[in-house]
Amino acid sequence: MPVYDYKCPDHGIFYELATMDESNKPAQCPHCQTLSPRIIMIPPEILDMAPAKRNAIEKNEAAQHEPQVSTVDSRAENTEKLKHGCGCQYHKKGKSKLMWTADGKKMFPSMRPWMISH
């Protein structure tokens, strides 16, 4: 049987075991026997989360059941982002890290020459 949170107006939060059918019904406070409504506790890490991260999580949760569908309008909105095909921020600014040697070969500025460049 699950444990649910209830809040007495005089004694505060208390916990009670209840069946799922009875979870929405008020429970009696163990101190004063007052019928107290069920409450839903929100973890503090959600309240303190950065708004951008919270929005990203909410968007991902919505996309789990409602996948994005490619339409003419959505493609038109993303044209600028996907101009060269990869959508990365570096190329969007018009700066490429790719360098060329004097003999015409590609030179990789990173320490990982095995990586595929754009």
Image (spheres, helix red, strand yellow):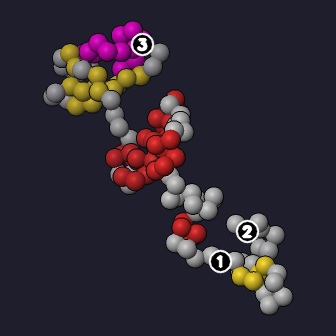
Q: Judge whether residue 5 is colored magenta.
A: no
Relative to 102, residue 108 above or below:
above
Q: Which residue is mark 2?
A: 117
Residue 36 place in picture, x, y as percent: 22, 20
Count neighbours of disc 2 (C-alpha within 10 A) and say few if under 14, some if 14 to 19, many if 20 or more.
Answer: few
Secondary-structure class at tag 2: loop
Residue 18 occupies which quadrant of the picture?
top left
Secondary-structure class at tag 3: loop
What stretch of residues is rendered in magenta?
Answer: 16-28
Please state which of residues 64 and 78 is positioned toward the viewer in this rendering. 78
Residue 6 place in picture, x, y as percent: 29, 24
Count neighbours of disc 3 (C-alpha within 10 A) and say few if under 14, some if 14 to 19, many if 20 or more.
Answer: few
Q: Which residue is mark 3?
A: 20
Q: Residue at x 55, y 74 (%)?
A: 94
Q: Of the residues shown, which amino acid type is indicated by label 2?
A: Ser
Q: Which residue is mark 1?
A: 97
Q: Earlier in the sequence, mark 1 or mark 3?
A: 3
Question: Viewed as shown, does residue 17 lie left or right of 37?
Answer: right
